[in-house]
């Protein structure tokens, strides 16, 4: 990745990835409010546009603090928003996140998004592990993690993720699991 790369706007083969922005809150809410899209995320679907706005503002602030964060994912061919994802820098790891509209599952978009995030994390700080917190029943997300080389290091203790059966998927052995993975 060149030094002058604009991490706030990344193009992949089929996706246009742009820094998550409050300007996209209505389109993002369409995704986060659909319980099918968030079936495996503790806390479930967002119940209001205000909830989504707060969530987007939180991750927009990450861009300001760390010059990296989650992207809004659009199809290059149409410009339609189909998901959110990328990396968020935590104290001891890169938090990998991807959420796609159910209408676009099964086409490899989540893998394409996750690979872009993985390349970005490796370019920015390869010493930090890349970590995805994946629900034990979310087979599709587990496949994405596996395709990019992450391994399942097992279920987290019940205190994490509100007691949901979340597994720690990472590119290397875990050193500690004391960080709050909430997204």
Image: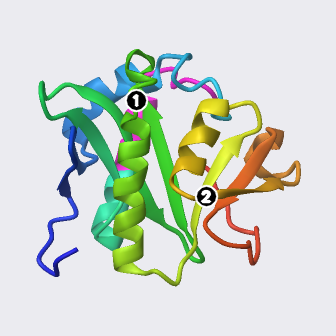
Q: Are the residues flagged by discs 2 and 1 in contact, CB closer than 8 Å?
A: no
Disc 1 crowd rating (10 Å Cα; few below 14, some 14-19, many 20+) is: few
**Residue 47 image offset from top left, x and y in percent:** 52, 20
Residue beneath disc 1: 50
For residue 93, above or below residue 71: below
User: Where does the image place residue 176, in percent across and percent down from the top left?
Assistant: 76, 74
Is residue 54 in the magenta section?
Answer: yes
- Magenta span dominant secondary structure: helix
SS at mark 2? Answer: loop
Choose between 29 and 133: the one closer to the eye: 133
Q: Residue furthest right?
A: 158
Judge from the rendering whether residue 29 lies leftward or rightward of residue 99; answer left or right: left
Q: Nearer the viewer, mark 2 or mark 1?
A: 2
Residue 101 drawn at (x, y percent): 40, 23
Res 85 visible: no
Residue at image location 36% in from the left, 19% down from the top = 30
| Residue drawn at the location 11% of the way across and 77% of the way down | 4
Front one among 174 and 51: 174
> Residue placed at 39% from the left, 15% from the top?
103
Q: Quadrant of residue 62?
A: bottom left
Marks 2 and 1, how far apart in space? 34 Å
Q: Say if 18 sits above or below 44 in the image.
A: below
Q: Quadrant of the N terminus?
A: bottom left
Hey, which quadrant is residue 119 in on the image? bottom left
Task: Using the image, determine if residue 177 lies above or below residue 140.
Answer: below
The magenta segment is 43-58
Residue at which label 2 appears: 150
Q: Secondary structure at mark 1?
A: helix
- Foreground residue among 136 and 89: 136
- Residue 150 occupies which quadrant of the picture? bottom right
């Amino acid at each position: 990745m060149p030094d002058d790369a604009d991490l706030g706007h990344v193009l992949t083969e089929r996706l246009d990835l742009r820094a998550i922005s409050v300007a996209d809150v209505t389109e993002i809410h369409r995704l986060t409010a659909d319980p099918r899209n968030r079936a495996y995320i503790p806390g479930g679907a967002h119940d209001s546009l205000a909830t989504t706005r707060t969530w987007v503002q939180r991750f927009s602030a990450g861009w300001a603090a760390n010059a990296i964060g989650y992207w809004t994912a659009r199809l290059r061919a149409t410009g339609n928003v189909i998901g959110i994802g990328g990396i968020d820098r935590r104290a001891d790891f890169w938090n990998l996140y991807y959420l796609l509209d159910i209408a676009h599952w099964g086409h490899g978009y989540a893998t394409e998004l996750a690979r872009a995030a993985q390349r970005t994390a490796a370019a920015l700080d390869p010493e930090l592990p890349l970590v995805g917190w994946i629900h034990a029943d979310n087979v599709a997300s587990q496949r994405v993690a596996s395709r990019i080389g992450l391994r399942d290091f097992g279920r987290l203790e019940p205190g994490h993720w509100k007691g949901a059966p979340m597994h720690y998927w990472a590119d290397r052995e875990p050193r500690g699991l004391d960080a709050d993975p909430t997204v």
